[in-house]
Amino acid sequence: MNDKKTGRVKQLERKMHSCTQLIEQLLRQNTYLRDLAVGTLETIKLMPDYEEAIQKLKDQNAEQAGKDANSEKKFEPLGEAGN
């Protein structure tokens, strides 16, 4: 009986160690992606016509928001579709 408990504890310890390693890997990847995104944004900001491109995106977004406000689209919450 004691061997079963010991085996179970060791199995749980291995699982916990695996989960810890996975979380650490995800945190490293998250940091890498954040640094990549910030670097990309800073690079794009240095490009010519950046301000003009941002203004065009803002105008497109405002135009799309106006279209969406006038449309008759009906969105259903997730999990309730098809009921």
Image (cartoon, rainbow, N blue to C red):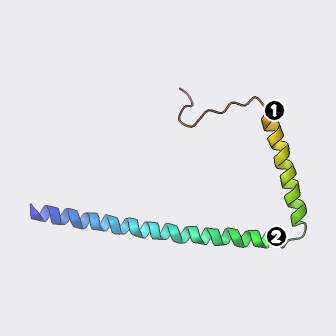
Q: Which residue is mark 2?
A: 45
Q: Are marks 2 and 1 in contact (CB under 8 Å)?
A: no
The residue sitting at the left extreme is 1
Mark 1, Cα crowd under 10 Å, few <14 / some 14-19 / many 20+, is: few
Residue located at (75% from left, 68% from top) = 41
The residue sitting at the top extreme is 83
Residue type at mark 2? Lys
Q: In this view of the protein, which residue sits in the foreground, 68 or 11?
A: 68
Mark seen at residue 70: 1
| 17 to the left or right of 26 | left
Ranked by sequence position, the earlier of labels 2 and 1 is 2
Q: Which quadrant is the N terminus positioned in?
A: bottom left
Q: Quadrant of residue 31?
A: bottom right
Residue located at (88% from left, 64% from top) = 51
| 4 to the left or right of 40 | left
Residue type at mark 1? Asn
Q: Secondary structure at mark 2?
A: helix
Residue 54 x/y as whole percent? 85, 59
Q: Secondary structure at mark 1?
A: helix
Residue 43 x/y as whole percent? 78, 73
Residue 10 x/y as whole percent? 23, 67
Q: Quadrant of residue 9?
A: bottom left
